[in-house]
Amino acid sequence: MAAGQAPAAESADQPPREDGVLQLPPIQVVAPTPLPEAVPRSWIPGAVDVLHGAGIGSSRPLVLPDVLERLPGITLQNEQGNPLQPNLTIRGFVASPVTGLPQGVSVFLDGVRINEPTVEEVNFDLIPLESVDRIEVIRGPSVLFGRNTLGAAISLTTRRGEERREIATGISGGSFGHVDTRFLLSGERRPLDYYVSLTGSYEDGYRDATESRVARAFAKVGVRAGGLDATVSYQYSNDRIKQAGSLPQSELRIDRRANFTAGDFFAPELNMAIVNAKYPLGETVTLEGNGFVRALSSEQFNANLVTVNSRLLNSTLSAGGSLQASARSTIAGRSNVTILGVEYVNSQITSRTFEAESGGQSLQADVSDNQNAVGVYAQNTLELVRDIAGPQSSLVLTTAARWDYVSQDISDLLGGPSAGTHSYDRVNPRVGLNLNLSERVGFYFSYSQGYRAPAFLELTCAGPGAVCPGLQVGVAPDPPLKAVTATNYEIGMQARPLPWLDVDVSVYRTDVSNDIFSVSPTGTTGVFFRNIGQTRRQGVEVALKGRMNSKLDTYLNYAYTTATFQESVELATPLPPGVESVPSGSSFALVPAHRINAGVAYRPWPWLTFSLGGRYISSQFLRGDEANRQPKLPSYSALDGSVTGRWHGFEGFVRVNNLLDNRYETFGTFAPNARMPGAPVERFLSPASPINVLAGLQYRY
C-alpha cells in the first residue's frame, strides 16, 4: 500500500511558525501507511484513533480486535467459538475471518493490505500483534487507503531495532490451559538495525474440543544511510484452530461449554516478505515505496450434522507494491502538501472443495482466480486562511481522488463452464475542511466516497442457481454482482478544554448502494450472494481521555450506531417459511445501537500499575432476523482488571477477564437443531467465557 506515516492523535498542535510563514514538520516515517506525517493531525478531516506500544500490550491481547475493543463503537462477536477468530464491527461494517459477511474494513500491515483476496476476510490470528508498535484506526471511506475501505481502515506498524539492545524472554499461562512463550532480540549497529520475535501459544479452550495452536516468527532488518531509510521484514505463521461455533439455546441452558459440531478447524500457513523504503529528493519532496510477496495456504474443515462434511483447501500467492511522492510547498504564501501515489497487486488463488466421508473424500470444486488490482490517487492539503479567529487559528482545505480497477479471471479447473472475467473500476472523491480556532479546539467536515468490488468467492456463488455448500466456491452465473459503493458525510470536533483532558466527537452518515449479503435458502446448507439495494449506517462517537498526573490515566467513550435497510428487500432466512420480507428502516443484525467503554489506570509507584476497564453493549438482533421480529440478543456488560509490576529487568502481571463472572452471549443466529426430532429451527448462541485469569513473567536485558 501507499507510503507515509500517520500523525499521532495527540499531536494536534499546529506546526511552528517562522516569520509569519507556517513551517511544516519534517517527514519521519516509521513504516509506510498512507497518512503522511507532513500533514498535522489538526489538518486531517476525519476521526483517527492511535495506539502505541505500551497501550497495545497492556491488555494482554490475543488478537488485534482485543486491543481495539475499548475504542468508540467497536464491537466483537465470537461467531466461531474461539478467542482467535472474532468478528469486529465498526460503524456497522465488518472485519472478520468468516466468509460470507459484508466486509467493509481494510487492514494493513506495514503498508500492505492483508485482507484476503478470496472474499476480503481478515485472519486476525496471522497478524504478529506482539511485534506491532503502532495502530491507527482511520474511520470512514478513504481515498488514500482505497478499495474495501467503507467503514474504516486499520493500519499496523511493526517494531524495528533501536539503539539500546534488547533481549527478552517471557512465559505466561492461565485458565483453559492457556500457555504463551516468547523470545525477542533487537538492537542497532549503525547503519543497520534488527528485530526478531519468536512466539508460541497453546490453549485447550473454554468450549469442548476447541484446542488452538499458534506459532509465529517475525524478523525485520532496517538501514539508515545517506538519506535512505529502508526495512525488510519476513513473517512465518503456522496455526491450527478448532472451532466450536454457536450452540442451540436448548443445549446452552444445560452446558455452556458444549460443542455442537465438534471437528471444525482452521489451519493456515503463511509466508510473507515486505520491503519498505523512503528517500528524500531535496528538502521538500519525499519518495516512498514498498513491495511484498505473500503466500498463504489454508485448510478449513466443517463438520455437518445435516449433510456430508466438507473440506476447503485455499492457496493464495499475492505480490505487488506501491510508490508515493509527498511534496511540501507554498501557494500564495500558504502552506501546501501534495501526495501522489500508485499501487498494483496481483493475486493467484486456487480453491478446492471436497466432500469428506468416513470412506474418503471426493473433489467437488476446483476453481482458480487471477486477480489484478490497480490504484492511482492524488491528494492536496492547502491552508486557505490562517489567524482567521485569532493566533494559531486556520482554515484548511483537503481535496483528493482515487481511481481503482479490479479484475477477476475465474476458471473452473474441473472442465466446467468458465466463470469468465469480471472487471470493476471507479473514481472516488474526497473533500474536507478543517477549522482550527486555536491550538486546543478544532472542527472538521468531510465528504468522501468508497467502493468494494465483489470478491472471488462472492462471484462464484452469486445467485440461486449457484448455491455454494458450506461457503465454498461454486460456478458464477450471469450477470455478475454489482460493486458496493459508499458515500460518507461527517462532522467532528477535537478539543483539549483542560491541559489533562482530550475530547473527540464525530457525527457521520454513510449511504451504501448495492451492499452484498450472503443468503442461506431454507432446507439447504449452502449460500449465495446478492446485491440488496440501499442501506445506511449513521451514528455519533464521543471519546474522552484524561491524564491528570503521572499516576492516573482514564478514558470514557460512547457510540450510538444504527445500520438500516433503506429499501424493502426479500431475504432468505432459516426461520419458517424460509423467506422474510424486510421493511425499509429495519435494523441490521448484530449491530448494537449503544456501546460504552470506561477505564482507569493507577500507578501509586512508577513500578506498579493497577488497571480496570469495563464495557456495556446494548441488545442486538440475531442474524437471520433482518425483519426485526424476533427477541433480541440481550444487552451485556463485562469488567476486566489487571496488575503489572516491574523490578529491574523483570515484569510480571496478573489479568482477570470477566471479573464479575457475568453470563452473556456475543453472537446469535437461527438454524435447525439436527439432534431434535423434526430438526426444529432454534436460536443458536455463542457464549462468552466465564471469569478467567492470565499471569506471566518476562525478563528483559
Image (tube, rainbow, N blue to C red):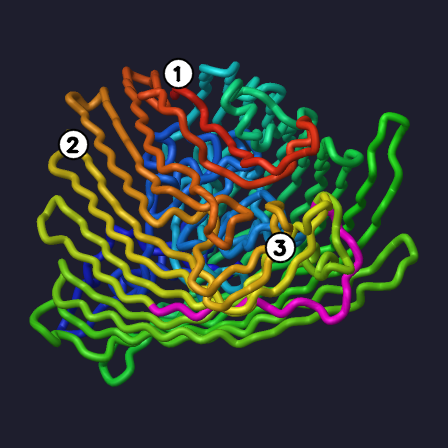
* Disc 2 and disc 3 in contact, CB within 8 angstroms: no
Circle 1 residue: 695
The image quadrant of residue 528 is bottom right
| Position of residue 296 measured from the top left corner of the image (x, y, whole percent) | 68, 43
Horizontal side, residue 370 vs residue 287: left or right? right
User: Magenta part of the protein: which range?
Assistant: 471-489
Q: Is residue 475 magenta?
A: yes
Secondary structure mostly taken by the magenta-highlighted segment of the chain: loop
Quarter of the image where the C terminus is located: top left
Nearest to viewer (mark 3 / mark 1):
3
The image quadrant of residue 699 is top left
Badge count:
3
- Secondary structure under the numbered disc 1 in the rendered image: strand
Nearest to viewer (mark 2 / mark 3):
3
- Secondary structure under the numbered disc 2 in the rendered image: strand
Q: Is residue 209 above or below residue 379?
A: above
**Whether residue 323 is visible:** no
| Position of residue 226 measured from the top left corner of the image (x, y, whole percent) | 45, 55
Residue closest to the eye, 678 or 429: 678
Circle 2 residue: 552
Q: Earlier in the sequence, mark 2 or mark 3?
A: 2
